[in-house]
Image (tube, rainbow, N blue to C red):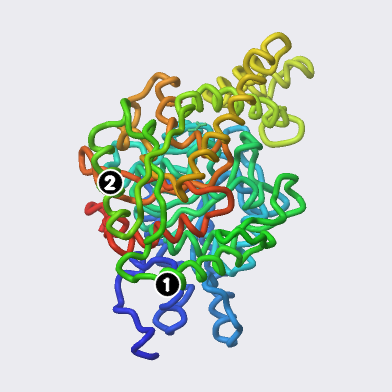
Amino acid sequence: MSAMTALPLQDLHDLTLAQQSQALNAGQTTSVALTQHALDRIAAHAALGAFLHVDADGALAAAAAADARRAAGQALGPLDGLPIAHKDIFVTQGLPTTAASKMLKGYQSPFDATVVAQLKTAGVVNVGKLNCDEFAMGGANENSAYAKARNPWDTSRIPGGSSGGSAVAVAARLVAATTGTDTGGSIRQPAALTGITGIKPTYGRCSRFGMIAFASSLDQAGPMARTAEDCALLLDAMSGFDARDATSAEQVRLHDGTLAANAPGVIGRELAALSLAAELADKARPLAGLRVGVPKEFFGEGVSADVLAATRAALAQLEALGATLVDVSLPRTELSIPVYYIIAPAEASSNLSRFDGVKFGHRAQKYSDLNDMYRKTRAEGFGPEVKRRIMIGAYVLSHGYYDAYYLQAQKLRRMIADDFQAAFKVCDVIAGPVSPTVARAIGSSTDPVQEYLADIFTLPASLAGLPGMSVPCGFGEHQLPVGLQLIGNYWQEAQLLHAAHAFQQATDWHQRQPTALA
Ligand code: GLN
């Protein structure tokens, strides 16, 4: 073992994916040891409600296979043998998949989602399935049919959602990284509220095949981890063209404008090019030349003072790293709420029609005829928020209301995307808050509309299909984490990850951890 690669041995759960990989290469630990440690920690912190299903036997077998590959001297990728977990929205062969709904209780998929399969190919060890809001509808993880997920910084508070379990598992260091999905903020908002890093890629970057559909024109998979570096490692492996997803992109435009095939490895190569450029330019000012757009609509009324202060301090930090701040405007930011809450439920009402008691999952026990079976199955299987969305969706799509709501929303969606393109004429990335407040108390919200309003800063990028990420940038009220949102132009994930990495080299917000769990 060389002194160059040897890490000072810390608790295994304190290692990031990159450090775990380094420790494996240096022979300091094994995949079985990492996996067993994760399983023990998951069991010790079961009260956090992060997991819906833990696959100890499968994980240990996969870890032993990874160790055997390593012992045999095979060339291994950087993720080989590292334990992670998947949001229970991704279907997984041989394991239950519920989407946190009673509707899919006991369901097992005959195949893996593409993202799950890609990560398996990269050698990762899947330790289980993570809690979330039912069918990914929500922002607090309170809509799970099975368990509340709790914020490790204060267990009386929400971790955000819908990828709440994914965020909790990383923030509590149960595993170093997880997958999530983001339709209107479900990776970025829980990442922000739990003090971790997460990226929602450009729509079309990651395959939606095997991701249980909520709103198909918005749904994207993405990684959640403690660092931008780890997010890059995962995203690199889980992205790429997939013929089984009709909206998967075949080609992506790189930051220098050239076109490349959307394949695993592209983001890594692009990042390498960016880091090299930064090193050649100026080490102390790695973001020299980066123009950061600051939309005035993201810093106005409705954002709490503590979130504003942390976000502004992060902007100053980006400036200190060489970036230039530019004022921009996203004038339809507020409209993104009604637009999203028309389009997403409309698509959901169509997508969820397949859960009828015939094809998948739950079927009512007692019924008089076929219609009664459908009615009872759906009444029993879906929770209240899912029913609300199906009803809104059916309404806005119905004859007589379609033009007034759905069609108008589609037109505005295009204008929201156009506003971003106007802004990107004068800046490279856009920065602002993720969530208007820090995490609220569990059970403290009874008004769905209030919940919808809190999505104001994540919805615009979702509607436009742009990549967005959340980076820990400080603490607000009650010592709760605050996230900085970075939004990039289409296919500019490497630029976002690069900026976030530079920020994390200069700050230690992403290294802070809830003391109660240390
Ligand atoms: N909170 C938003 C909603 O409830 C976003 C959910 C998501 O991104 N899956 O729809």
Picture quarter with the C terminus:
bottom left
The residue at the point 36 percent across, 24 percent down is 445
Instruction: Give whichever of discs 2 and 1 has the lower sequence position.
Output: 1
Q: Is residue 480 above or below residue 368?
A: below
Residue situated in front as seen by the camera: 362 or 148? 148
Residue 105 sits in which quadrant? Answer: top right
Q: Is residue 485 above or below residue 240?
A: above
Picture quarter with the N terminus:
bottom left
Instruction: Name the residue tied to disc 2.
Output: 153
Looking at the image, residue 102 sits to the left or right of residue 196; the answer is right
Instruction: Name the residue tied to disc 1.
Output: 20
Element at label 1: helix
Element at label 2: loop
| Residue found at the very far right of the displayed protein | 370
Looking at numbered disc 2 in the image, what kind of residue is underneath it?
Trp
Looking at numbered disc 1 in the image, what kind of residue is underneath it?
Gln
| Residue found at the very far front of the displayed protein | 426
Residue situated in front as seen by the camera: 483 or 287? 287
Residue 421 percent across, percent down from the top left: 55, 40
Residue 466 percent across, percent down from the top left: 55, 44
Residue 394 sits in which quadrant? Answer: top right
The residue at the point 55 percent across, 50 percent down is 201
Looking at the image, residue 187 sits to the left or right of residue 12; the answer is right
Real-space Cα separation, disc 2 to disc 1, in angstroms? 24 Å
Q: Is residue 326 above or below residue 141?
A: below
